[in-house]
């Protein structure tokens, strides 16, 4: 017999002796008779080999009538040699059934029996623990196989066990192999778990457009199971005369606007087949919208793959609407023979909330889960610098909670796994009660900035509502473990933070391509300020940009219906300051009723709308680098009392050097799009 835990037993005895000694005299003449421990019977546990580890208390159900007597386990022994799945720890046994998976089969049980004594230090009561581990043999897992090849390939060999797995790690084999009666005689041979098809046997009997199908039935077996499987192989004929690709059907893809990028194979078979066996190529430059499908560029696409950012269709759909958008394109073979194919994208509009990739951005669970904070003081002990969730519906932007930042605090939120390579995102930081002081947002990788620091300021305009501050960025291969960083200088409230994917397509831009890029060398529909011109020397992108040498407003009027209630808009443009130095570089953007200006072009109030206290009609951003992408979110239903924006002719105004600074600026790629 194997005796275990000698050291532990001796230690328990020593501790017990010490405890007894501390309890007073052990004189037999003065102490009452000791009662032996009792229990409610021997212990038994039954588990399956697939169960998780579990722990058994060897003293469970054991009692002692003598007050103060501590119970312990003594003389724990077992005759079992294989204890690989058992761990002993004083009065506990932990059993890990999976340790015995390889040695147990279905219907088999491994039994481990322990004998031991329940002791109070004076008397022992025998007891046993029986652990029964029931075996279970996992069946092989697989699906049927379908394969296709061209007759000109000559022959192909297929492993009949391809993709089959066994959770028990058993060796799998092929059993009861047979061919369908319709298979061509002599074309297929079976050996050692593989089947080979030689198309030369029947090549003279098929032509382009023909398909010969082979079906093989067999079973995949482990030692205890034998389950049926089918391999279907389609051999396509090849034309000897050159033929263009054949388009059999429309290629389709289904998505929702909050989905990740969708990859669509534009030459997928069987929708598109070349009967000469040639490789087919899709010409992305020929992609043409059908009907009311928007003329998107699908800029991430390459080769034969159409890469779709579903969010680009957001503004094209009503709430919860599903709609299909079709595009035609040209496919060709190496000989230059072409055909026209069609791809149809079925898109469903998701809710605004579904687009926000940050799990805890409104603090409605009452916690800062996912967020970390660090006081900016060197010693880190200043208790007046902190961030905390506050429940106060009257001061929350959404729901009942918001984040109160007090003092100079750095906040961080780990974005690992939340961002998609190649996609663009806006981060929206609605803040309230922050006045005359800069604060910052950025996306960082450790201590390395991945974006510029978005430098925000309300600068005295504190209307008692949440104002949205925004930065945009595009994810590249530097984004491995990115984090959102917020650096506050002073107090503010934060709520309803959003990190949302967007996709720019010129077809969605409220401004025309010329009014966005100035590439014909003119200002287009812009009315430039007195210090601004269209320049071909100080340029951000392309051949021309707006160039401003002083202050002033650059305005463009947009027709009624451009801005509508119930929608949110993102304004962004590139801005470059040739004489940039770390200093005050304030720029400002406005969106307002075009009639809401006086004779000098200064904004005024209309229809009893008090802009300075109730409307987010402007955003101020400071440059924190020589070239940045400036952005602003216009959330009219949150910040405006007007409910008739669709009837109003609106004006977009861009201003530089708003407090009389003398810096020079170039502005380009002005974009105004609807966003979730």
Image (spheres, rainbow, N blue to C red):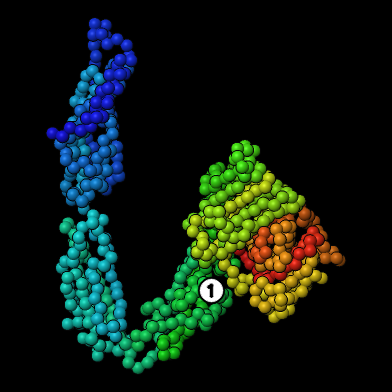
Residue extending farthest right: 599
User: Is the residue 538 above or below the residue 339 in the image?
Assistant: above
- Return the residue found at the far left: 1
x and y percentages locating residue 668 in the rendered image: 68, 71
Kindly tell me whether residue 453 is visible in this rendering.
Answer: yes
607 and 674: which is toward the camera:
674
Image coordinates for residue 459, horizontal then vertical, percent: 74, 53
Residue 154: name its quadrant.
bottom left
Quarter of the image holding residue 224? bottom left
Tag 1 secondary structure: loop
Residue 366 screen position, x and y as percent: 55, 42
> Residue, x 71% and y 61% (percent of image)?
581
637 vs 544, nearest the viewer = 544
- Residue occupying the point 27% across, 28% down: 59
Q: Position of residue 509 (x, y in %)?
A: 64, 71
The quadrant the N terminus occupies is top left
| Count of all numbered marks drawn on residues in the image | 1
Residue at the (30%, 79%) spot, across then down: 149
Position of 289 with respect to 35 (left or right) is right
Task: Identify the residue position indicated by label 1 in the image.
Answer: 298
Q: Is residue 650 above or below residue 16?
A: below
Q: Quadrant of residue 187?
A: bottom left
Q: Please give the name of the residue rendered at 58% of the width and 44% of the height, measured from the top-left corner.
A: 374
- In the image, residue 64 sits, relative to residue 49, either above or below, namely above
Q: Residue furthest top?
A: 29
């Amino acid at each position: 017999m194997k005796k275990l835990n000698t050291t532990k037993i001796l230690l328990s005895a020593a501790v017990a002796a010490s405890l007894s000694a501390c309890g007073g005299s052990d004189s037999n003449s003065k102490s009452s008779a000791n009662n032996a421990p009792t229990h409610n019977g021997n212990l038994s546990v039954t588990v399956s080999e697939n169960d998780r580890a579990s722990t058994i208390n060897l003293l469970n159900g054991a009692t002692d009538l003598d007050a103060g007597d501590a119970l312990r386990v003594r003389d724990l022994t077992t005759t079992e040699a294989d204890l690989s799945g058992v761990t002993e720890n004083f009065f506990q046994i932990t059993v890990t059934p999976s340790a015995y998976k390889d040695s147990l089969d279905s219907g088999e049980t491994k039994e481990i029996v322990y004998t031991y004594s329940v002791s109070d230090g004076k008397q022992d009561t025998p007891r046993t623990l029986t652990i029964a581990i029931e075996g279970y043999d996992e069946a092989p897992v697989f699906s049927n196989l379908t394969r296709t090849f061209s007759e000109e390939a000559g022959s192909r060999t297929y492993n009949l066990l391809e993709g089959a797995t066994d959770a028990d790690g058993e060796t799998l084999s092929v059993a009861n192999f047979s061919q369908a009666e319709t298979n061509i005689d002599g074309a297929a041979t079976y050996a050692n778990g593989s089947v080979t098809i030689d198309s030369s046997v029947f090549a003279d009997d098929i032509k382009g457009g023909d398909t010969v199908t082979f079906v093989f039935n067999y079973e995949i077996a482990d030692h205890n199971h034998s389950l049926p499987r089918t391999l279907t192989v389609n051999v396509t004929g090849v034309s000897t005369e050159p033929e263009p690709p054949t388009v059999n059907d429309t290629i389709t893809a289904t998505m929702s606007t909050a989905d990740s990028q969708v990859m669509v194979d534009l030459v997928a078979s069987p929708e598109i087949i070349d009967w000469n066996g040639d490789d087919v190529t899709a010409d992305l430059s020929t992609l043409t919208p059908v009907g009311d499908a928007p003329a998107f560029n699908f800029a991430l696409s390459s080769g034969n793959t159409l890469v779709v950012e579903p969010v680009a269709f957001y503004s094209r759909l009503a709430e919860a609407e599903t709609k299909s958008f079709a595009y035609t394109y040209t496919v060709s073979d190496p000989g230059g023979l072409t055909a026209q194919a069609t791809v149809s994208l079925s898109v469903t509009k998701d809710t605004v909330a579904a687009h926000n990739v940050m799990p805890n951005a409104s603090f409605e669970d009452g916690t800062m889960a996912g967020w970390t904070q660090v006081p900016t003081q060197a010693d880190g002990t200043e208790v007046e610098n902190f961030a905390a969730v506050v429940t106060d519906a009257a001061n929350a932007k959404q729901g009942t909670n918001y984040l109160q930042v007090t003092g100079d605090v750095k906040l961080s939120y780990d974005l690992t796994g939340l961002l998609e390579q190649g996609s663009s995102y806006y981060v929206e930081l609605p803040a309230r009660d922050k006045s005359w002081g800069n604060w910052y947002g950025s996306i960082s990788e450790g201590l390395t900035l991945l974006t510029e620091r978005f430098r925000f300021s309300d600068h005295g305009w504190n209307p008692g509502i949440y104002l949205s501050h925004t930065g945009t960025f595009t994810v590249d291969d530097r984004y491995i473990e990115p984090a959102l960083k917020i650096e506050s200088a002073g107090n503010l409230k934060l709520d309803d933070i959003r990190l949302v994917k967007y996709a720019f397509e010129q077809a969605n831009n409220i401004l025309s391509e010329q009014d966005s890029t100035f590439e014909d060398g003119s200002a287009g529909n812009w009315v430039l300020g007195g210090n601004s011109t269209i320049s071909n020397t100080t340029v951000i992108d392309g051949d021309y940009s707006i160039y401003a040498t002083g202050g002033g407003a650059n305005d463009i009027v947009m027709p009624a219906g451009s801005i509508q209630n119930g929608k949110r808009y993102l304004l962004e443009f590139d801005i470059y300051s040739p004489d940039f130095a770390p200093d005050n570089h304030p720029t400002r953007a406005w969106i307002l009723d075009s009639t809401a200006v006086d004779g000098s072009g200064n904004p005024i109030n209309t229809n009893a709308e008090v802009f300075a206290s109730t409307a987010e009609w402007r955003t101020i951003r400071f440059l924190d680098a020589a070239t940045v992408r400036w952005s602003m979110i216009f959330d009219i239903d949150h910040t405006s009392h007007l409910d008739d924006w669709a009837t109003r002719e609106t004006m977009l105004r861009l201003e530089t050097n708003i407090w009389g600074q003398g810096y020079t600026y170039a502005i380009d790629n002005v974009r105004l799009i609807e966003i979730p």
